[in-house]
Amino acid sequence: MTLETSTVVPDLSGLHLGAGEAAGDRITGVRTSLAFLPLGNPISDAKVFTGRQKPLTEIAFVFAEITTESGLSGLGWAYSKRAGGPGMYAHAREVAPGLLGEDPSDISRLWTKLVWAGASVGRSGLATQAIAAFDVALWDLKGRRAGLPLAKLIGVHRDTVAAYNTSGGFLSMPIEAVVENAQRSVANGIGGIKLKVGQPDRKADLARVAAVREAVGDEFTLMVDANQQWNRQDGLRMGRALEPFGLEWIEEPLDAYDAQGHAQLAAALDTPIATGEMLTSVAEHAELLRLRSVDYLQPDAPRVGGITPFLKLLALAEHAGVSLAPHFAMEIHVHLSAAYPHTAWVEHFEWLEPLWNERLELRDGRMVVPARPGLGLSLSDQARAWTVETTTAGTLSVN
């Protein structure tokens, strides 16, 4: 059963609202929802094998649906794995009424308004992840108003983006299943495959990589992800041991906050270094770029606070000349990677497909940028069924 609440607010149409007055449209309703997507089987990466986390069994989503007096609507979301979803939802529903009466075009100003509304609990982390749902919804709305996909609204450099798959390479799967999944992914047209490593037994890691490399061939794109489980010494040893496999990158070899250590590995190894997915602010990513800690920057739009801060990261990354491989949320990141001028990838996860009525297309190892306006997505009946709580501020004009 879904618990639904509502917030009644005064009519703001007659108030002076500053910079947004000229456009004439106003936000009239915001619906914020909490849903839990169950996974078919528990998922484990190196953090589970080292005892730092429990297996992943579900993903929490905070959905935001925004409507305006002109009849426009936008859909956005944020997410959390293992813990934090209810906290994100609580923060989001608390600040949501601040959007009512505002011009939806003033996205940067509204992001600043929302982040300062909750500044006493911080301007990164859970607080900014919660408002990411609203920021994404506003960008979706803006694309729908313009009749353009988000990528075209920003300005694309490509209509398809190289795509790699992660969901078939988790450590909870026996090596035989990983090899089978890799071969199936290649047959289905994926452009690359990422394997989880970082087990206490380093030889087991190398054996998994060797088995998949043999199965897919020397020319196929292969990556590995240690999920922050090596120290600097082990990271260097494993990086050198992995060099013969011709990897596209080694992801998160060290603690996510060890920018200096990643810089040392990037300088010492031929294999590119990738990291950034666990960071929750522009400033943290900027430090990676300043120290030249990455060859592939991996920001996550919902984790850094939405599309607005992500676009700032695109500018910084372009200036630094690094490649881009955003984490998770392919439905958002296919648009953002298409708008990046340098080498860019998108991470393919079929886990989220039940949430949407639409599907993303893979073609010749690449993900096709949807032609539908905005993000080109609508919530499925299944997503509604997985929703456990909903709060509405103002008057919503969508179903």
Image: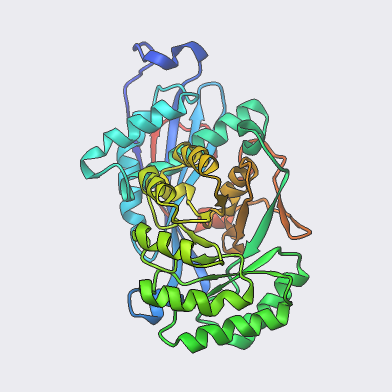
In the displayed orientation, state which residue is furthest to the front. 268
- Who is closer to the viewer here, 274 or 378? 274
Reply above or below: 307 against 186. Answer: above
Residue 14: quadrant of the picture: top left
Q: Say which residue appears at 38% left-offset and 41% top-offset.
A: 131
Residue 147 relative to residue 205: left or right: right
Q: Say which residue appears at 62% left-offset and 37% top-offset.
A: 150
- Who is closer to the viewer here, 280 or 268? 268
Q: Say which residue appears at 40% left-offset and 85% top-offset.
A: 200
Reply above or below: 269 against 66. Answer: below
Reply above or below: 336 against 247. Answer: above
Residue 51 relative to residue 178: left or right: left
Residue 30: quadrant of the picture: top left
Q: Position of residue 355 (x, y in %)?
A: 57, 55
- Who is closer to the viewer here, 357 or 161? 161
Residue 113 relative to residue 148: left or right: left
Residue 380 in sight here = no
